[in-house]
Image (cartoon, rainbow, N blue to C red):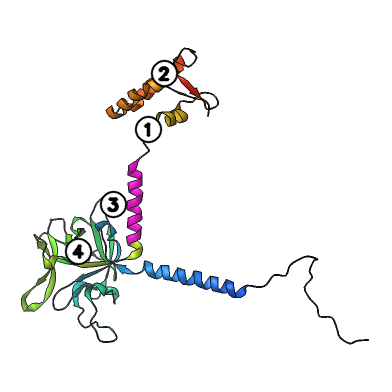
């Protein structure tokens, strides 16, 4: 007898087709889905320019294109004071200077958190480090970031210009600006009457907050559009049907309903129509036309 043993195999039924494993394809698919998810997350965290004032929210980067060196508005959590930081030394790896519009935050001290005041175009600007102090301006134009609570002096109204730059107006209808004091030092002031070069800032926000703002605006527009224009047949199907969903229409009264709609008394006219239809529905000589749904 032969010593060769039969090799064990998986039990199969007659006519059953063998299936090939596609582990590699599944891995590739999972890899593609994972990479697309990572790409989407990266896109959401990308710093972009706002196109409308309502988009300014969440983590915010404020930069002024001062010549010869742009400056960022920073907050020093140790001293509790505002710092205008020069970024002329922030170069790329190859030594080339970074363009103003290509700059993004490199330190948490450069990031501010913007929250919107409910029902108002104004915003609150809070520090992203430390205990969360609010940027404020008093009636003398002195700008600081040492308030724990927010009030009228902590409210700012952003104004976005066609070129993408932003100005910030305080409650006194004065604008935030970069001012040069004695000795060449720079500081923020809030007493400018007009918007010029020193009152214009580049503001960057994260893309996910811009997308969120646009979605909210879209929903508000859809809600403001209200219900579709009143249609006699549709209204009758909803509110004036008799047994088994039977609707009754009158061709002669459509003009009257259009006139009532223009005059703002459509609901009253529909009630009158309902009373008339109930009265004449059983009359064979009526001009009403009946339709089964």
Residue 272 found in image quarter: top left
Find residue 129 and report its horizontal and vertical position in percent. 29, 71
> What residue span does the magenta drawing correspond to?
210-229
* Spatial CA span between label 2 and label 1: 19 Å
| Tag in front: 3 or 2 | 2
Q: Residue drawn at (18%, 58%), measured in percent from left and top?
A: 153
Vertical placement of 179 versus 168: above or below? below
38 sits to left or right of 16: left
Label whose residue precedes the other's in the sequence (1 or 3) = 3
Q: Which residue is mark 1?
A: 230
Q: Which residue is mark 4?
A: 163
SS majority, magenta: helix
| Tag in front: 4 or 3 | 4
Label 1 with label 3: CB-CB less than 8 Å? no
Residue 4 found in image quarter: bottom right
Q: Which residue is mark 3?
A: 118
């Amino acid at each position: 007898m032969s010593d060769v043993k039969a090799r064990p195999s998986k039990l199969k039924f007659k006519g059953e087709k063998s299936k090939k494993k596609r582990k590699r394809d599944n891995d590739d698919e999972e890899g593609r889905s994972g990479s697309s998810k990572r790409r989407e997350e990266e896109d959401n965290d990308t710093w972009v320019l706002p196109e409308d004032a309502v988009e300014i929210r969440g983590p915010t980067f404020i930069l002024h294109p001062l010549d010869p060196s742009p400056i960022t508005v920073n907050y020093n959590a140790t001293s509790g004071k505002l710092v205008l930081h020069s970024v002329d030394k922030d170069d790329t790896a190859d030594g080339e200077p970074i363009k103003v519009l290509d700059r993004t935050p490199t330190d948490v001290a450069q990031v501010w958190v913007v929250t919107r005041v409910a029902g108002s175009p104004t915003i609150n600007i809070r520090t992203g480090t430390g205990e969360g102090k609010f940027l404020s301006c008093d009636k003398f134009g002195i700008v600081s970031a040492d308030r724990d609570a927010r009030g009228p002096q902590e409210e700012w109204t952003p104004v976005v210009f066609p070129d993408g730059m932003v100005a910030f107006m305080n409650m006194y209808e004065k604008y935030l600006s970069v001012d040069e004091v004695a000795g060449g030092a720079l500081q923020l002031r809030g007493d400018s009457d007009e918007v010029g070069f020193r009152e214009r800032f580049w503001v960057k926000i994260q893309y996910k907050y811009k997308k969120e703002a646009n979605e909210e605006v879209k929903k508000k527009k859809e809600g403001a559009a209200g219900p579709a224009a009143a249609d006699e047949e549709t209204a009758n199907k909803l509110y004036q049907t008799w047994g088994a969903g039977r609707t009754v229409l009158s061709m002669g009264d459509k003009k009257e309903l259009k006139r009532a709609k223009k005059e703002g008394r459509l609901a009253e006219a529909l009630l009158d129509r309902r009373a008339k239809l109930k009265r004449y529905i059983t009359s064979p000589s009526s001009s009403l036309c009946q339709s089964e749904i």
